[in-house]
Image (spheres, helix red, strand yellow):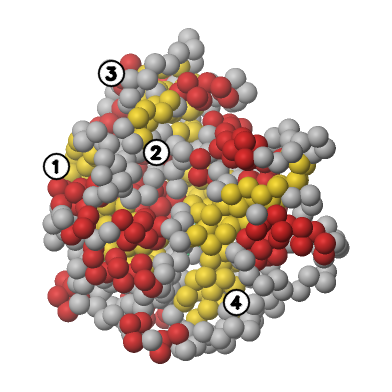
């Protein structure tokens, strides 16, 4: 991976750095290098200073305990409560009447909750959860559309010290089941259904298909969002409304240790089984609080909109905990950008006077393709800052975003981070960092990253390598839930003392990071991580499939499109109908986001002599590239036959 030189990328005129706009810089929280210098001079006292922005019930004794790597502890013996930091503290500071959450539904219904309102609702639902038998340390699964109750539930869990495990609403009941079983959740909070492009999709009745196989679930709470009918199992199932009416609204936040678990969030890895990424309380809050404030240059009157779903880490860190712990006003939208029309997002920006907008490159590429008339038809004058997350943003999309959405004056923060990192790690600070379209620029103050070769040695300027983090950071994952071995193996065994991100990257002459995407068997489809093995397991689960190999084919909008090569069992014939059935089966096992775009039937899969499927080769075939070295192949004939099949 170390032979390609990218050092001359910048000879192109349009890739010259964009300097911060003077007017923006003049008002920016960070407008010079002081914070970077402070962090470089003494990283731990810098993080201690960041921690001063959090309200602690008992202050910590030690900033970082690194005596037992890779099990790090931050803010040792500190006591706090995350929900109290997001709510009670804001009300105490006089922000009770400030809007905390503005929600618009797909149908145009709107709900606004002030910080006082949100505190009241969260306290009530905390009382409800406690009555349902949820205690500190228990797990609660949340499978819901983007409605305020989802956020209320998350905060109620953290208020009582229960771990939430949010499962993206678009995952299938089967995927929900796997995550419930792994986390051993006691309670499931879900909805009767969700609105999607004017239709309704059932959730509770779908969950019922798997709940009999989830023995840990004692209670199910249902938010009635759509009116879709569902059955209630006596003593197990309750509606949100019946529980919340009469619930006490003075539930006191539970005292948590800095290292008490805060939440589990499942993410795809290189095996068929998703990883339960575990985050803890103190360090996570310090990390997301500081990054939200400085990366999004928090201003009191901002109306901030992050378009992620709460089912992903972006939703956790930068819809809920980062913004609310800073007392920001958060806008959330239930629907998709092209329903009822392709100007839906721009209409919302105009209507709510959104000032900060944070979205994903895949969405930006779709907006580009739909045409300029949609943003041009709306008044986007309220915007002052734009963000991007989830995958590398190609310079073309960056420039379009800058010109057509930011009207040339909004800085773009391209933020690199992961479910595991919990917080933004590589990012510009909008008032100081010269921006280069396509680069996430530099590490956030207090973060140390590098690009190394396969021996763990720093690469030279312009040379590709692997992105690593060199020292622990407060919001880092602490382990994989009940799987320490996999935690050590996945992140810490590659290179001694370095955290392995799984991403390829290179650095330019200015030290800017250029992230190139995953180097492992994880795909990035529309900004969502999907493990090739997960899709393969879903395919072989079908009675007709003998073997499957899944790759990501480069795709203009989605980044990667899932492409599957399938060999069938004796007696089955490949057909368009079977391909459709297999796609549907993957949708059932994982969710629509994992449905392969293309399925190819083949007699055999290309394997190395040791039996490993050669994905690189399949990728080359799918993308019609010349084939590289095939001498290690067990049966070179296989390649020829696959290639022929592909051309048909
Ligand atoms: C990719 C999402 C390039 C990367 C917050 C990473 C990015 C994975 C960027 C994590 C970015 C995220 N530039 N690539 N700005 N942001 N990625 O866990 O491959 O859903 O490893 O977290 O997304 O995805 P995850």
Q: CA distance from mark 2 to mark 3?
A: 19 Å
User: Which of the labelled discs sits on residue 423, or is there none?
Assistant: none
Q: Is mark 1 within 8 Å of ligand 1?
A: no
Q: Secondary structure at mark 4?
A: strand
- Which residue is located at x 83 percent, y 57 percent? 611
Q: Give x and y (percent) for residue 445.
A: 39, 73
Say if 448 sits above or below 53 in the image.
Answer: below
Q: Secondary structure at mark 2?
A: helix
The residue identified by callout 2 is 154
Tell me the quarter of the picture where residue 643 sits: bottom right
Q: Give x and y (percent) for residue 349.
A: 19, 52
The residue identified by callout 3 is 245
Q: Is residue 300 visible?
A: no
Marks 1 and 4: CB-CB under 8 Å? no
Q: Foreground mark, 4 or 3?
A: 4
- In primary-sequence order, the first of circles 2 and 3 is 2
- In primary-sequence order, the first of circles 1 and 4 is 1
Say if 583 sits above or below 318 in the image.
Answer: above
User: Which of the labelled discs sits on residue 97, or is there none?
Assistant: 1
The residue identified by callout 4 is 465
Q: Give x and y (percent) for residue 644.
A: 71, 59
- Which residue is located at x 52 percent, y 21 percent? 208
Quadrant in which the C terminus is drawn: bottom right
- In primary-sequence order, the first of circles 1 and 2 is 1
Q: Secondary structure at mark 3?
A: loop
Is 187 displayed left or right of 607 in the figure?
A: left
Q: CA distance from mark 1 to mark 3?
A: 23 Å
Say if 30 sits above or below 233 in the image.
Answer: below
């Amino acid at each position: 991976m170390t032979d390609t030189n990218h050092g001359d990328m910048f000879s192109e005129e349009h890739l010259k750095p964009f300097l911060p706009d003077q007017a923006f810089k003049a008002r920016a929280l960070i407008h010079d290098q002081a914070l970077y210098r402070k962090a470089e001079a003494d990283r731990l006292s810098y993080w201690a200073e960041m921690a001063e922005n959090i309200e602690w019930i008992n202050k910590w004794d030690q900033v970082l305990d690194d005596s037992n790597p890779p099990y790090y502890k931050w803010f040792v013996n500190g006591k706090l409560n995350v929900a109290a930091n997001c709510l009670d503290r804001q009300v105490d500071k006089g922000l009770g009447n400030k809007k905390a959450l503005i929600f618009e539904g797909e149908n145009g219904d709107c709900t606004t909750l002030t910080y006082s309102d949100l505190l009241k609702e969260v306290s009530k639902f905390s009382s409800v959860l406690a009555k349902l038998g949820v205690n500190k340390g228990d797990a609660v699964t949340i499978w819901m559309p983007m409605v305020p109750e989802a956020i209320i539930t998350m905060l109620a869990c953290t208020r009582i010290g229960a771990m939430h495990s949010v499962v993206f609403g678009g995952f299938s009941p089967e995927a929900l089941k796997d995550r419930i079983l792994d986390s051993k959740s006691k309670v499931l909070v879900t909805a009767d259904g969700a609105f999607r492009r004017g239709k309704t999709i059932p959730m509770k009745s779908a969950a019922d298909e798997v709940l009999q196989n989830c023995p840990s679930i004692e209670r199910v709470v249902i938010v009635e969002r759509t009116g879709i009918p569902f059955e209630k199992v006596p003593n197990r199932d309750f509606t949100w409304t019946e529980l919340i009416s009469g619930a006490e609204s003075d539930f006191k936040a539970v005292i948590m240790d800095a290292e008490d678990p805060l939440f589990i969030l499942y993410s795809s890895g290189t095996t068929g089984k998703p990883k339960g990424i575990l985050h803890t309380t103190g360090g996570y809050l310090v990390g997301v609080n500081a990054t939200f404030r400085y990366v999004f240059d928090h201003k009191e009157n901002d109306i901030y909109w992050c378009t992620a779903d709460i089912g992903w880490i972006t939703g956790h860190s930068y819809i809920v905990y980062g913004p609310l712990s800073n007392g920001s006003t958060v806008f959330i939208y239930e629907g998709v950008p092209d329903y009822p029309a392709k100007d839906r997002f721009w209409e919302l920006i105009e209507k709510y006077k959104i000032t900060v907008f944070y979205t994903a490159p895949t969405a930006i590429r779709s907006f580009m393709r739909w045409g300029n008339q949609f943003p041009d038809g709306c008044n986007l004058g309220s915007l002052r800052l734009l963000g991007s997350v989830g995958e590398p943003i190609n310079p073309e999309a960056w420039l379009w975003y800058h010109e057509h959405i930011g009207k040339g004056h909004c800085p773009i923060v391209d933020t690199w981070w992961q479910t595991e990192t919990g917080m933004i790690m590589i990012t510009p600070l909008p008032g100081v960092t010269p921006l280069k379209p396509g680069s996430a620029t530099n590490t956030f103050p207090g973060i140390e990253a590098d690009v190394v070769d396969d021996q763990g040695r720093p690469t030279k300027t312009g040379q590709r390598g692997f992105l690593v983090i060199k020292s622990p950071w407060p919001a880092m994952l602490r382990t994989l839930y009940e799987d320490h071995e996999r935690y050590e193996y996945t992140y810490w065994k590659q290179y001694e003392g370095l955290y392995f991100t799984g991403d390829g990257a290179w650095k330019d002459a200015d030290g800017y990071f250029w992230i190139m995407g995953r180097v492992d068997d994880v795909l990035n489809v529309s900004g969502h991580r999907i493990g090739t093995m997960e899709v393969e397991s879903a395919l072989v689960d079908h009675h007709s499939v003998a073997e499957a190999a899944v790759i990501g084919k480069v795709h203009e909008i989605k980044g990667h499109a899932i492409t599957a090569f399938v060999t069938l069992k004796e007696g089955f014939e490949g057909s368009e109908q079977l391909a459709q059935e297999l796609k549907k089966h993957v949708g059932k096992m994982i969710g629509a986001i994992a449905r392969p775009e293309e399925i190819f039937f083949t007699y055999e899969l290309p394997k190395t002599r040791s039996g490993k499927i050669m994905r690189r080769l399949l990728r080359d075939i799918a993308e019609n590239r010349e084939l590289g070295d095939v001498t290690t192949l067990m049966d070179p004939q296989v390649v020829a036959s696959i290639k022929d099949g592909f051309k048909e």
